[in-house]
Image (spheres, helix red, strand yellow):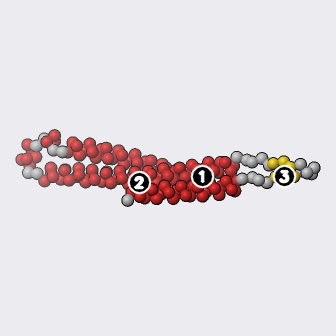
Amino acid sequence: LIYSIYIDCKLQNQIMNDDTIAKLQAATTNNHTNKTDDKNIKPTTTNNTGQQLIANYDKIAKLQTATATAKIEMTTTKTSYDDSLRRLTAAKELLRAMDPDDQAKIQVNDTNLPELIDMHAVATEAYKGAKSRFETNARYLELFKAKA
């Protein structure tokens, strides 16, 4: 499901990009000529604003793709994070529910708690990184959209 959403987003962005670029190229093409008094035809000079618009829309398209990818990654890592937290919490509850005499005899290395703590630390780091990338991409996307 996540992969199909990713493909749909990518295809939609590509269609939007191709359509937007074609419109911009058509709008910025300068085929007009200036006629002087002596009937000499001089082509007008094309400014760089059209090229800058195309470059900005290209950046926006890339940011949209990167943001969609980061959102998918954030969702996936959030699922891993939630799963690792659930497992860690369950292991802690099992230890707390043990008989106090058994708790005194058991050592931490006898449980799967160290592995669960490590797994949760890795999942937390991955989720925070993915969330940060998504938020940064979304912020830059809004900035570029505001400029365009």
Residue placed most toward the observer, 45 or 114: 45
Measured in 3D between alpha carbons, the distance from the residue under mark 3 to the one under mark 2, in whole angstroms, is 52 Å
* First along the sequence among labels 3 and 2: 3
Secondary structure at numbered mark 1: helix
Question: Would residue 14 appear left or right of 47 to someone viewing this image?
Answer: left
Q: Position of residue 32 (x, y in %)?
A: 79, 54
The crowd level at tag 3 (other Cα within 10 Å; few <14, some 14-19, many 20+) is few
Amino acid type, residue under disc 1 in the picture:
Tyr
* First along the sequence among labels 3 and 1: 3
Measured in 3D between alpha carbons, the distance from the residue under mark 2 to the one under mark 1, in whole angstroms, is 23 Å
Asked whether the viewer can see residue 5, the reply is yes
Question: Would residue 48 appear left or right of 95 to someone viewing this image?
Answer: right
Tell me the tag on residue 72. Answer: 2
Question: Would residue 113 appear left or right of 75 to someone viewing this image?
Answer: left
Amino acid type, residue under disc 3 in the picture:
Asn
Question: Residue shown at 46%/59% (left/top)?
Answer: 8
Q: Quadrant of residue 145?
A: bottom right
Amino acid type, residue under disc 2 in the picture:
Ile
Identify the residue position indicated by label 1 in the image.
57
Identify the residue position indicated by label 3 in the image.
34
The crowd level at tag 2 (other Cα within 10 Å; few <14, some 14-19, many 20+) is some
Question: Residue shown at 67%/48% (left/top)?
Answer: 51
Disc tally is 3
